[in-house]
Image: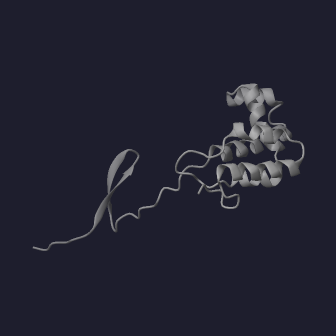
Amino acid sequence: MTTVVRPIHFAVKNRRKRLVVGPEAPTAALPGRVPRMAHLMALAIKYDYLLRRGTVADLSELARLCQVTQPRMTQIMNLLHLAPDIQESILFLNPSPGRDWMHERALRPLCAMVSWHAQRKRWKAIHAATGVDPVTQSPP
């Protein structure tokens, strides 16, 4: 009688366990979730593209299609008033395993500033107040 010893592991796909023959599956560390502010910034850019292209007629129609109120859509679109480098740093925020350190409500006064220079100064102050490194975008 011959005995074959071979490592196997079970993988879950489509809510069912399946036998997978071969080496053990590599365990990947969970990267965390993308911060909500990065999602909102990306949505604002996409919505602006749809408006400029003429796919949607106006902000009210866009709000109706996205099933949000018109004032909420305005709040999201106001993120486009930020300086380009601030928009970029929001888009590339590091994934966080826990709660987000930045919220859209905290950026509303920043979006209302006309001067990009003043926005950048306030952006650095926000980073200093939260203790987040502006380069790595990660909390201490």
Q: At 84% across and 37% down in the image, what residue appears?
A: 54
Q: Is residue 48 visible?
A: no
Residue 64 position, x and y percent, is 72, 26
Residue 30 position, x and y percent, is 48, 56
Q: At 33% across and 67% down in the image, what residue appears?
A: 22
Q: Quadrant of the C terminus?
A: bottom right
The correct choice, above or below, for 28 with respect to 81 in the image is: below
Tell me if 8 is positioned left or right of 81 in this view: left
What is the residue that sits farthest to the bottom in this orientation?
2
Q: At 74% across and 41% down in the image, what residue appears?
A: 107
What is the residue that sits farthest to the front in this orientation?
129
What is the residue that sits farthest to the right in this orientation?
115
Identify which residue, 78 or 56, lies in the foreground.
78
Residue 29 position, x and y percent, is 46, 59
Q: Quadrant of the N terminus?
A: bottom left
Q: At 35% across and 46% down in the image, what residue appears?
A: 16
Q: Quadrant of residue 89?
A: bottom right
The correct choice, above or below, for 20 with respect to 102 in the image is: below
- What colouring does the structure picture have? one colour
Identify which residue, 75 or 115, lies in the foreground.
115
Tell me if 91 is positioned left or right of 52 in this view: left
Q: Is residue 66 visible?
A: yes
Q: Quadrant of residue 113?
A: top right
Residue 48 position, x and y percent, is 80, 41
Identify which residue, 25 or 99, lies in the foreground.
99
Q: How many marks?
A: 0
Tell me if 139 is positioned left or right of 6 in this view: right
